[in-house]
């Protein structure tokens, strides 16, 4: 058999056709995958979801009680409460409020009370309030008394007190004190409706 030019062309033509189809397919796949792989964008699945590779990151957080007058929620904390709300710490005439800072949320009880010395205070419930008389508000027991409001700082929420002591630097003299005046957060926190796990 003579291998002339006609025979060579007739044999080579199908091979060239197969190679062309293969190259076109390969280039098409490379182009399609490159559009999202290079850009960092994951293509959507047919159902509109982002597929397994784009599963959402689940951040766990939980809530704990810290006595009858406060509770908090914090990421990564093993908690004993399903949630933490103002109602969680409100008992009697105590009123609750929640403050959020970064990944921590705290709900505390606020109330007014009068100590045995006659000093009246409105603010968060503290161990110092034990044994004191709960009050609906604080006022001046005598005309010479002073009611002093202290604004929130990065470490303490607002507070207000009435006594015979003059207001100190940084405090504002007011006519009376009530829970509504002090039910707030530290200056670096935000007042929110509730803490959630």
Image: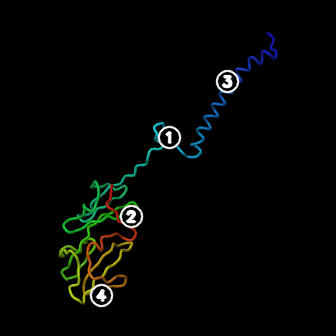
Q: Earlier in the sequence, mark 4 or mark 1?
A: 1
Return the disc, 1 or 2, that comes first in the chain's sequence: 1
Does residue 94 sit above or below 121 in this rendering?
A: above
Where is residue 182 shown, x and y percent of the image? 30, 73
Q: Residue at x 60, y 41 (%)?
A: 34
For discs 1 and 2, the disc positioned in front in the rendered view: 1
Tell me the tag on residue 191: none
Assign the N terminus to one quadrant of the image.
top right
Q: Helix or strand or loop: what does disc 2 sit on? A: strand
Residue at screen point 26% across, 67% down? 109
Q: Is the residue under label 3 in contact with that under label 1 (CB below 8 Å)?
A: no
Sequence order check, earlier mark of 3 and 4? 3
Q: Which residue is mark 1?
A: 44
Residue 157, image quadrant: bottom left
- Residue, disc 3: 18
Q: Is residue 173 above or below residue 136?
A: below
Circle nearer the N terminus (4, 2): 2
Label 3 to label 2, Cα distance in Å?
A: 65 Å
Separation of marks 3 and 4 at Cα, in angstroms:
97 Å
Front-lying residue, 146 or 70: 146
Q: Nearer the viewer, mark 1 or mark 3?
A: 1
Looking at the image, residue 3 lies above or below residue 39 = above
What is the C-alpha distance between the residues marked 4 and 1?
68 Å
Percent of width and height locating residue 139? 23, 81
Residue position marked by numbered label 4 in the rendering: 166
Q: Which residue is drawn at the image coordinates 24% and 63% (left, top)? A: 89
């Amino acid at each position: 058999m003579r291998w002339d030019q006609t025979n060579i062309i007739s044999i080579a033509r199908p091979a060239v056709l197969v190679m062309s189809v293969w190259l076109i397919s390969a280039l098409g796949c490379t182009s399609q995958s490159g559009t999202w792989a290079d850009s960092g964008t994951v293509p959507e699945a047919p159902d509109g979801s982002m597929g397994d590779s784009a599963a959402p990151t689940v951040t766990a957080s939980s809530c704990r009680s810290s006595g009858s007058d406060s509770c908090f929620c914090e990421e990564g904390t093993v908690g004993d409460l399903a949630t933490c709300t103002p109602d969680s710490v409100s008992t009697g005439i105590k009123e609750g409020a929640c403050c959020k800072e970064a990944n921590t949320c705290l709900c505390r009880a606020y109330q007014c009370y009068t100590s045995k010395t006659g000093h009246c205070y409105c603010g968060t419930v503290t161990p110092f309030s034990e044994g004191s008389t709960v009050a609906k508000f604080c006022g001046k027991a005598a005309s010479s008394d002073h009611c002093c409001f202290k604004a929130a700082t990065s470490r303490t929420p607002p507070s207000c007190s009435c006594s015979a002591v003059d207001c100190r630097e940084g405090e504002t003299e007011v006519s009376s004190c009530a829970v509504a005046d002090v039910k707030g957060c530290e200056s670096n926190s935000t007042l929110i409706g509730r803490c959630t796990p």
